[in-house]
Each structure stands twice: as C-alpha cells, then as structure tokens.
Image (spheres, grey):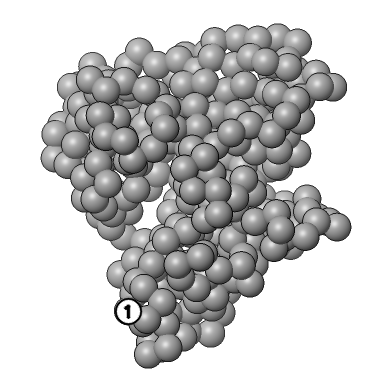
Amino acid sequence: MLFKFPTASQAREDEVTPRELFLSRRSLMVGGAAALALGSLPIWSRNAWAAAFEAQTTIKPADPKFDPTTPMKSATTYNNFYEFGTGKSDPAENAGTLKTRPWEIAIGGEVAKPMTIGIEDLLKFPMEERIYRLRCVEGWSMVIPWVGFPLAELLKRVEPTANAKYIAFQTLNDPKQMPGLRSWVLDWPYTEGLRLDEAMHPLALLAVGMYGEVLPNQNGAPIRLVVPWKYGFKSIKSIVKITLVKDQPATAWNKSQPREYGFYSNVNPEVDHPRWSQATERRVGDFSRRKTLPFNGYGEEVASLYSGMDLKANY
C-alpha cells in the first residue's frame, strides 16, 4: 500500500515511497551510546518576534527534562523554503509541484570515488529516528523527530582525499517545479557548506523522513541535511549535489548578507543578529520565551570542533 503525506497539492502516488519500503529502513535507537543522537539530549528554541517583545515576555528557565515534540501540523505548515515562496505557509501551499522521483545526488570533487546515487539507494542506508531541536536564525524553533542516517556514512563511500577540507551542498534549481526561483530573493541555486569535520560528526544527519513518515515536500523532500547545533538555514533541503572542496565554499545567505549570516552559524546566545537579539527564544506554539543555549544545547557533543576559535569573529 502506498501512502501520501497531506499537503495543499497532493503528490501523485508514483512519486511517493511505498510505506513498507520506507519503514523497513528505520531502526529506532534507544538508550546507551545511542542517546548521543536521540531525545535524551536537551532541546531548546526561539521565535523571531522582534526584539521589542524581548523585555516584556516571560523567560522560561532552561530545563532539559521538559521538551515536548512540536505537533506535526506545525512542523509541516510553518516553514522557510524560499524556492516555494517567502511566507511561512507558502511551502506547504506550493511545494506540491516538486517531483521527488526520480531523484539523484551527484557527489564529487576531492574524492577518490565520485558517484551519483539515486534516492532508492539512499533509502537502503540503515535508518535511525532522532529527535532534534531546530533553531531558526529568525528566533523561532521546533522539536522534530527526523528519520535518516549520518551524513558521514555517505561521505565514507566516496573516500574524501587529503585535499578535502569542506563540503559544498546544492539544492535543486528548477523554476518549473519551484516557483520561488523566479524571484530575486537569493542568488540561486541555494547553496550551503560545512567543514569536513563538522560533516563527519555523528549528529549531522541526512533526513528522508519525519514523524515516522516520508519527508514532506515543504520540509525538503526527498532528502535534506539536519545540523542541529547550527541555525536552521544551514540544514539545506532537496539536495542534488555534494562537492568536497579544498577551500571554504560560498553559501547562499552569506553571499546575500555577509554581515548577518556567517559561514559557521552556530547557535550562540552571545552573538546577536544585527537586527535582533539571540539571547532568548520562543518555540512555535509557545507564548513564553526561554534562554538560548550555546550550540542549541549540543555543546557537550560539538564544542570541541571549535576549540581555540573566536566564535564571535567566526559567527
């Protein structure tokens, strides 16, 4: 039996992964060392209501013991995916035009074994369900159960060479499927990047699903990156190209507004956006605010990646 994730524009059945195939790739990790990637980690977030509200709203104390999952409806109808429009509801309303089959990712650059891999082969990777915080640079955030596999597992297959220091990612660039590409909001196609050691970190995830279902178009189908200790725009959607490179790659938002969006974009309450504070945050669906945690609460796992770096200069 096939199943479809409900959107304003329903996808054709032949463009949707069979539920049995998708669910057969999932292996739920619980307890022990697996807790590194699961919901036992603290999760915090923030909404980008203007800084004017900051002083007059309640701040919840950071309590890692209480962090409920965001309702699926909120996570699938409140999105940033400018390829389908700049409004928060635009992706859910417009992303039905995206065709996710066939789909391939070309992987090359500084690798010993360049390859092009299709989505069906990507679905053969052992899957895990991971509950991560998603913190938007605008200030809103969610707590989402993703289904996917570590990015490192894919990168190992292409065997990065000694020259590979960074990873460059690219989103699909097709105006026929993505009406937002006809605007001049960004220099298309959307691009993002990580250092190689960041990409190889076990928390960096390639997601193909969420809430136990196939990834919806508006959330980056059929495959997207999830880097939970960085602001959400680093978690590039609908990936078609991965290139390992020697030099730091250009990224979409950094090219557009370098003063506002740095290459690293680690969640940092001590580095404000030029137009608003990052000290507190509000989760979607919550009216109170809470303190932002360094690295979005994943500092114990990832802070060592930036040992000795000035995180204010390298924002």
**Residue 120 spot, x, y in % from top left:** 44, 16
**Residue 96 spot, x, y in % from top left:** 20, 31
Dividing the picture into quarters, in which one does residue 282 lie? bottom left
Q: Amino acid at mark 1?
A: Phe
Q: Judging from the image, what secondary structure is the residue with disc 1 in?
A: loop
Dividing the picture into quarters, in which one does residue 72 lie? bottom left
Left of 28 or right of it: where is 282? left
Please determine whether, in this image, residue 43 is positioned above or below residue 109. Answer: below
Is residue 106 at all visible to an observer of this figure? yes
Please determine whether, in this image, residue 266 is positioned above or below residue 169. Answer: below
Left of 129 or right of it: where is 72? left
**Residue 91 spot, x, y in % from top left:** 25, 42
At 39% from the left edge and 24% from the top edge, which residue is drawn?
172
**Residue 232 spot, x, y in % from top left:** 48, 51
Read off the residue under disc 1: 287
Q: Which part of the image, by quadrant, shows the N terminus?
A: top left
At 47% from the left edge and 84% from the top edge, which residue is drawn?
60
Q: Which part of the image, by quadrant, shows the C terminus?
A: bottom right
Crowding near pointer 1: few (<14 within 10 Å), some, many (20+)? Answer: few
63 vs 265, nearest the viewer: 265
At 73% from the left edge and 29% from the top edge, which residue is drawn?
247
Is residue 29 at all visible to an observer of this figure? no
